[in-house]
Amino acid sequence: MLSWSVAFFIVAIIAAIFGFGGIAASAASVAKLLFVIFLVLAVVSLALGRRAPT
């Protein structure tokens, strides 16, 4: 998930350099969304992984 976020961020930077503003904004928003999803899943995984076995 994090690798997809980084890939979309790189696409956004390259698109912005070449002047494709719409594509850059779209890729940046997708990268942000994927990063937030990654963070949520990482926190949930961390919280559930620390449970004591019953």
Image (cartoon, grey):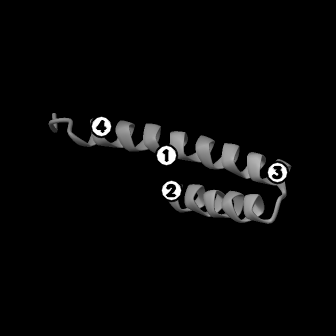
Disc nearer the start of the sequence (3/2) = 2
Q: Is there CB contact under 8 Å for labels 3 and 2? A: no
Q: Locate residue 15, reporting x and y percent.
A: 77, 61
Q: Earlier in the sequence, mark 1 or mark 2?
A: 2
Query: What is the x, y in percent for residue 40?
Result: 45, 37
The residue carrying mark 1 is: 38
- Name the kind of residue labelled 4 in the image: Leu
Tags 1 and 2 touching, CB below 8 Å: yes
- Callouts 2 and 4 close, C-beta under 8 Å: no
Look at mark 3 in the image and give the residue it sits on.
21
Q: CA distance from mark 1 to mark 2?
A: 6 Å
- Mark 2 is on which residue type? Leu
**Which residue appears at 29% of the width and 35% of the height?**
47
Residue 49 versus residue 5: which sits nearer the camera? 5
Specify the label residue 11 is tagged with.
Answer: none
| x, y percent for residue 22 | 84, 48
Distance Cα–Cα, label 4 vs label 3:
40 Å
Task: Name the residue type under label 3.
Answer: Gly
Determine the image quadrant of residue 50.
Answer: top left
Residue appearing at x 53%, y 55% in the figure: 1
Residue holding disc 4: 48
Task: Name the front one of labels 2 and 4.
Answer: 2
Reading the image, the residue beneath label 2 is 2
